[in-house]
Image (spheres, helix red, strand yellow):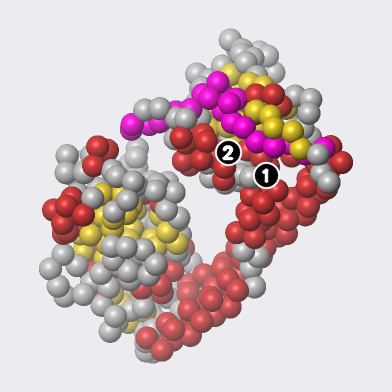
Amino acid sequence: MTNKQSIKFGDICREVKISTKDPLSDGYERYIGLEHLDSGSLKIKRWGIIKEDNPSFTRVFKKGHILFGKRRPYLKKAAIAEFDGVCSGDIIVLENKKGIRKGLLSYLIQSDSFWEWAIRTSSGSLSPRTKFKSLADYGFELVDESVQIEQENLLNKSFEIENMSVLCKKSLSRLLDMLVLHNTQSNHEIRSLKQAREIEVPQGWSQYTLSDLAVNTKNSFVIGPFGSDLVVSDFKNSGHPVIFVRDIKPNRLDWVSNTFVSDAKFEKLAAHKVEAGDVIFTKMGLPPGISAVYPQNFNDGIITADIIRLRPNLELVEPEYLSYIVNSRFFRQQVRMITAGQTRPKLTLADFRKLVVYLPCLEKQRKFLDLLTMVEGISFDRKIHKSVLNHLMG
């Protein structure tokens, strides 16, 4: 029988508090902000250069430390440092103590139960933060080192398979993206919206603006309510989902916000509701214009002010196909031209209405979606890795 002991997170992990007054003189070249950490990923894929950006960060981290985003923990940002540097004060620098294997600690932090604890112990309404003191009280059962080695090896293999699957899916998605581009433009980059509207397309394809594709009913193409109409105090533990920009990922809704409005509030904001089959777009972000289809398994919800909802005409376009086209390189080029020079890239409702897409007939759209389903079907579902992780670390 496996021996287990009940311990707290603070027993096996400490917060590292090292600072520097002059990062460059102390030999540090790179810095990490929250924007450099990806939700749910232990890998740091980007960073800033201190000499170029001159950030005010003074907190030092070393290779092997875990960088944990304490602001808005519902975003689930934590990663392993692969180099020395400085980081934002909104990041907690962690290292393991005796009692747990270093590799296993990072997986523990990625478990659902740990994130639930971090979210529950955070404070603040608009931008909640947690503290290491609160994280240190997280309790769990730790197994013997021999079992830890087995768990770490299993999770490492699962993580490797997931990463290879993600790379495979990205490569196949790029191939499909190239097929879209092949049928909508030449191999050259478009350099103006006028050029986007003058592309020669194959027989059977048609040019539309997004406005053309909205079903001809009232409120078919709308933005979310203003902040004064939808405030934090309205959020409940059950009711109708509230969709934020952070919930929209390319071609999928990843509802990390987990916030609701009551039935009464939902009725007052009915003009801004979103339902299954609607296509929703981010008005702002890095970049703006990311799109997803509102899923069938969600109750009708409310979009926030930085989101635009399109109710598509099903006689012209399949919602999933439109979402994929909007996330393609051709569409993104149009968005970049409109937002070029803006400090905080943002699209207006008028901007969205005039953006151009090219569509084949519905039969060809459906064949494309069938191919896309096949691509997704051969990809390793990251939920498998997550279920293994939660089973071992939960």
Seen at 78% across and 45% down, the residue is 152
Which amino acid is tagged 2?
Phe
Q: Is residue 157 left or right of residue 290?
A: right
Which amino acid is tagged 1?
Met
| Of 330 and 268, the residue lying toward us | 268
Tell me where the magenta segment starts and ends, as one range.
125-144
> In this figure, which residue is indicated by the disc labeled 1?
393
Residue 138 magenta-highlighted? yes
| Of 168 and 337, the residue lying toward us | 168
| Residue 250 visible in the displayed image | yes
Question: Residue 37: image x %, image y %?
Answer: 55, 39
Crowd class of label 1 (few under 14; some 14 to 19; many from 20; radius 10 Å):
many
Question: Residue 72: image x %, image y %?
Answer: 44, 35
Question: Residue 320: image x %, image y %?
Answer: 41, 72
Residues at marks 2 and 1 touching, judged by CB atoms closer than 8 Å = yes
Residue pushed farthest right?
146
Callout 2: SS: helix
Q: Is residue 18 left or right of residue 39?
A: right
The part of the image, by quadrant, that contains residue 352 is: bottom left
First reached walking from the N terminus: tag 2 or tag 1? 2
Residue 330 magenta-highlighted? no
Q: For the C terminus, which image quadrant?
A: top right
Count of labels in the image: 2
> In this figure, which residue is indicated by the disc labeled 2?
114
Seen at 71% across and 27% down, the residue is 12
Callout 1: SS: helix
**How many angstroms separate mark 2 from mark 1 (CA)?**
9 Å
Question: Residue 143: image x %, image y %?
Answer: 77, 39
Seen at 14% across and 73% down, the residue is 217
| Residue 103 visible in the displayed image | no
| Of 54 and 262, the residue lying toward us | 262
Residue pushed farthest top?
21
